[in-house]
Amino acid sequence: MKKIERAAHLIGKHRSLFQCPICKEAVTIKDTSVICTSNHQFDLAKKGYVNFFSKASPKDYDKQLFEARYQVIQSGMYDLLHQKIVNILTSGADKSTNMLDVGCGEGSHLQQIQQRSDRDLVAVGIDIAKDGILTAAKYHPDMIWAVADLAQSPFQGGKFDIILNILSPANYQEFKRLLADNGMLIKVIPRADYLKEIREQVMQQDSQHYSNTEVINNCRKQFDHIQVETIQYTWEVPSDLHTALWNMTPLTWGKKMKKSYQSITIDFDIIIAKA
């Protein structure tokens, strides 16, 4: 089965998750197009994704960045984070089925979490960066990928048991609309030492001056029940991935690598918020 056909099958099977981003009506699949009852049509790409986003994608988030990010993530840089998230899902009282990754990039976080979980997860990833979704569909064909913006959401309300928001901007009102009863938002945000080896070189910035307290407090205002867990570790960088590590982050845009790093620091707060 071709990628476009596999994508059409997956979206058709789970079409109850979707709505038209223009008129908010229900959708169906006809051949390889998503069509709503008002006849707004969104064609699936041959690479195996659907584009609901009417604006141009951010130019800086390009194929090179997402290919580099894929290489690094698949090599294990975030393995401990992924396992931590799976453990959080396992500890939940409810059986989670539908998972949405908002700002999924090239999809590896979502793919790794689905792969590690013993739950039957329907995995959906969205991003406004077309190159990110292209890369996701290229490497992870049996998941649902869409170029989409939460400001013009292609999803019906109350359909997702889990929303992932990893190192990406939040839209809390939309998160709350999309979450099912007893649903869970897992938001990952950087702490002071995240990528400090790179940050201190390119920004001449003391990492200890960084704080995400405002982000956490804002989330507390939106959800009645939240908890915050911390994960910190160092990752030994494989010798063949120094360039990929440099290219995977916006921190280094327009800058040349002066030195490579034998190890890199991972330092996150994980916000767990329940609807």
Image: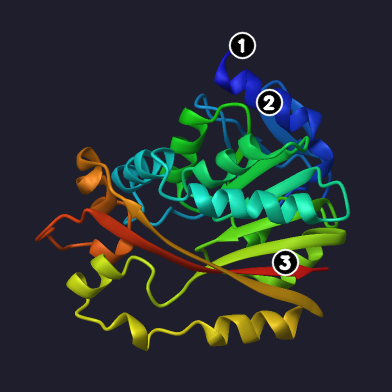
Q: Residues within 10 Å of mark 2 (few under 14, many from 20)?
A: many
Report the disc number at residue 260: none
Estimate the spatial distance between the alpha carbons at disc 3 and disc 1, rounded to whole Å.
34 Å
Q: Residue at x 51, y 24 (%)?
A: 46
Q: Nearer the viewer, residue 20 or 1?
A: 1
Precedes in sequence: disc 2 or disc 1: 1
Report the disc number at residue 1: 1
Q: Amino acid at mark 1?
A: Met
Vertical arrangement, residue 25 with respect to residue 71, above or below? below
Q: Amino acid at mark 3?
A: Glu
Q: Nearer the viewer, residue 89 or 140?
A: 89
Location of residue 26 (image quadrant): top right
Vertical arrangement, residue 218 with respect to residue 32, above or below? below
Precedes in sequence: disc 3 or disc 2: 2
Residue position for label 2: 8
Location of residue 170 (image quadrant): bottom right
Q: Position of residue 10 (x, y in %)?
A: 72, 28
* Tag 1 secondary structure: loop
Q: Amino acid at mark 2?
A: Ala
**Which quadrant does the N terminus fall into?**
top right
Q: Residue at x 84, y 40 (%)?
A: 16
Residue position for label 3: 174
Q: Position of residue 192 (x, y in %)?
A: 40, 78
